[in-house]
Image (cartoon, grey):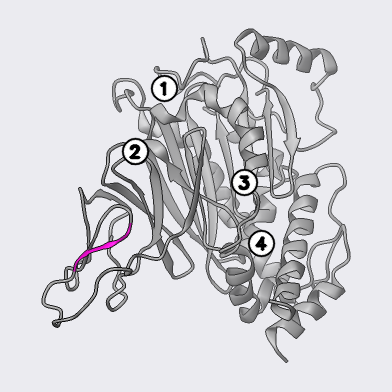
Amino acid sequence: MSIAEKMGKLLAQRRRGFSLPQGLYLDPEVHEFDRRAIFERHWLQAGLLAQIPRSGDYLTFEIGGTSVIVLRNEDGGIGAFFNTCRHRGARICREKTGRMGRRLVCPYHHWSYDLQGHLAQAPRMHPGFERAGIRLAPVRVETVAGLIFVCLAEHAPDFAPFRAALEPMLEPHELIHAKVAHTVTLIERADWKLVMENARECYHCRAGHPELMRSFSDFTASDVSGRTEEWIAAFEGRCEARSLKTGSVIGPWYELERFPLNEGALSYTMDGRPAVAKRLGRLGDGDVGVMWWAVQPNGFNHVTGDYGFFFQALPTGPMETTVTGTWIVHEDAVEGVDYDLAALTQVWAATNDQDRALSENNQRGVESLAYMPGPYSQTSEQLVLRFADWYCGAAERYLQWLANP
């Protein structure tokens, strides 16, 4: 049976409003299908503009076994290329971030490319060799409110509606003046869809995340006590006084919202007080709740008045997912002066470790002979429902494309 036939059968078995058929979480062939159908065809958040401020600065981003270079070119624009030399395929940039200056130089045979991706030099090639027309393969790249997104597909989903929704809500946080304070990488022994289902709901949070719940007010559910109309109106009034847009947007592959934290909390910290003395953006005292956005298939982000936390999950093998957590602060914030790294990272580090244990336990249970798809909560798992619907729709569209490329 071909993978297209297998996926067609599994998707046909899926009961909407229920968790996915067992094979979609376990089959190694589904992992390969997901890499091609999902991660190579949709927008993925690759980094911050602030990470590459100067011409020749670059960052790399890996999707499956494919690496992408994102760089700042001579005119200040952003370009992206597959990190694969056109000579014999070696990776050109081997670090996560760095600086190449005016040329991208392959470390293998020293073929070099200008910042537009054109081959500039190919030493010791034979007479008559023509370098004209040889260039690095381009990758689609978009920027919005200080963020960088890439898509490996030739025909990417429309980015313009996402930009129009996110930019006015996120721009006041001025992520163009942020820097990465800390990054942590976790290997989770669970299918990426189970990792993301766990990340898309807080049904488990009260029992599973005591540190997070000191400040987090669950905006994903409709039955949270204390979230009265008057309380929400007071929060929105505080935001409007700072010229901050509120409300929520649900798009075809994204969702975003500004929501309040628990009463008296200003940040995701153990005591609810800011972790960083220097605020992010034009936010006054920082009492602005949380600016949250999630992008299908694999990430969510929280930015408070003092710092941001980015979560990203990438499948790295059958039933294995690499989770990256990134903390950002104001570019002028100094560790040990303006913030204590342990205090900054404590809540989300604990949450990440707890979620790893939950996802891995979920994976072990799904492997059981007794597993059958169970009903998602219509009250507390609305974002999981949207994720599952999106995944199945994207998979079906890819199958249609395979049948009629």
Q: For mark 3, what is the residue?
A: 159
Q: For mark 2, what is the residue?
A: 76
Of label 3 and label 4, which has the lower sequence position? Answer: 3
Real-space CA distance between mark 4 and mark 2, rounded to the nearest whole angstrom: 37 Å
Q: Can residue 266 be seen?
A: yes
Contact (Cβ within 8 Å) of mark 1 with mark 2: no
Residue type pointed to by label 4: Lys
Q: Position of residue 28 (x, y in %)?
A: 61, 80
User: What secondary structure is found at the residue carrying circle 1?
Assistant: loop
Real-space CA distance between mark 4 and mark 1, rounded to the nearest whole angstrom: 33 Å
Residue type pointed to by label 1: Val
Crowd class of label 4 (few under 14; some 14 to 19; many from 20; radius 10 Å): many
Q: Viewer-proximal residue, 65 or 340?
A: 65
Front disc: 3 or 4: 3
User: What secondary structure is found at the residue carrying circle 2?
Assistant: loop
Contact (Cβ within 8 Å) of mark 3 with mark 2: no
User: What secondary structure is found at the residue carrying circle 4?
Assistant: helix
Q: Position of residue 51 (x, y in %)?
A: 35, 40
Q: Would you place residue 150 above or below residue 293 in this image? A: below
Q: Which mark is residue 193?
A: 4
